[in-house]
């Protein structure tokens, strides 16, 4: 502390020995140096603040992306659970189910051929299907039958449909494959 007082006292004595013109020049130079130091400090703080703002904005953008991904993951998980519930919910006896829906639609199934159960995907889902042949069937009755089949319990879908129209009597011959899906028992 004593050295600082001595140094300041020497500077004051030196400054007092200067002429008026020299004092003005020293003060102007000192002011310019002080202004430059303040400018450098201000720019440094501004750059640091901009860096913080930029990093904060980048983190906020990442957070928004995570929220969107979490939302879409949640929706996909809910869809998967709903589908799994459908796959486990309805244990459809396909032959009797198809026969029942055909009768309700006013049709008779002259030819029904069951196919072997097949594992699909990763083998966790089992597909049971039956091939049907309808001869001389009315298109409205066929439509009603196919619509009723797909509205049933569980997951029942019309996989294939091939039609051959008969213009003479306004009927058609239809070949279709109806399949049901269920989760493989664990």
Image (cartoon, grey):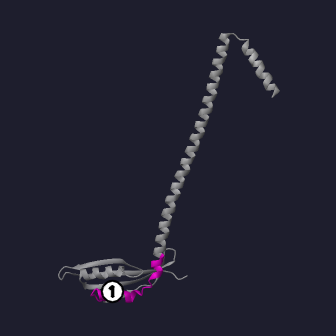
Instruction: Left or right? Give the position of 67 relative to 148.
Output: right
Location of residue 1 (image quadrant): top right
What main secondary structure does the magenta stretch of the protein show? helix
Report the residue at 61% width, 35% height from top.
Answer: 44
Q: Position of residue 47 (x, y in %)?
A: 58, 37
Tell me the element at label 1: helix
Quadrant position of the C terminus in the picture: bottom right
Instruction: Left or right? Give the position of 175 relative to 181.
Output: left
Report the residue at 64% width, 28% height from top.
Answer: 37
Location of residue 158 (image quadrant): bottom left
Q: Position of residue 79 (x, y in %)?
A: 46, 70
Q: Residue furthest right?
A: 2
**Foreground residue, 159 or 182?**
182
Q: Position of residue 99 (x, y in %)?
A: 34, 89
Q: Is residue 47 above or below residue 173?
A: above
Report the residue at 63% width, 22% height from top.
Answer: 31
Whether residue 128 appears in this view of the structure is yes
Instruction: Left or right? Give the position of 102 relative to 65.
Output: left
Look at the image and give the residue range highlighted in magenta.
84-108
**Foreground residue, 57 or 42?**
42
**Foreground residue, 13 or 145?**
13
Q: Is residue 97 above or below residue 47?
A: below
Q: Position of residue 34 (x, y in %)?
A: 64, 25
In this figure, which residue is indicated by the disc labeled 1?
101
Q: Is residue 171 above or below residue 60?
A: below
Total label count?
1
| Residue 152 is covered by the magenta coloring | no
Report the residue at 53% width, 51% height from top.
Answer: 60
């Amino acid at each position: 502390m004593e050295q600082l007082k001595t140094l300041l006292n020497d500077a004051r004595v030196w400054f007092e020995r200067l002429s008026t013109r020299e004092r003005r020049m020293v003060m102007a130079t000192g002011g310019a140096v002080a202004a430059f130091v303040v400018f450098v400090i201000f720019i440094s703080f501004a750059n640091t603040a901009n860096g913080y703002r930029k990093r904060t904005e980048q983190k906020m953008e990442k957070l928004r992306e995570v929220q969107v991904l979490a939302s879409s993951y949640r929706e996909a998980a809910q869809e998967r659970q709903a589908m799994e519930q459908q796959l486990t919910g309805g244990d459809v006896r396909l032959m009797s189910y198809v026969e029942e829906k055909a009768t309700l639609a006013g049709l008779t199934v002259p030819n029904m051929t069951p196919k072997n159960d097949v594992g699909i995907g990763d083998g966790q889902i089992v597909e049971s299907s039956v091939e049907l042949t309808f001869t001389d069937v009315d298109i409205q009755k066929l439509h009603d039958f196919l619509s009723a089949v797909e509205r049933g319990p569980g997951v029942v879908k019309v996989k294939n449909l091939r039609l051959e129209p008969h213009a003479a009597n306004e009927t058609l011959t239809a070949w279709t494959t109806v399949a049901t899906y269920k989760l493989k028992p664990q």
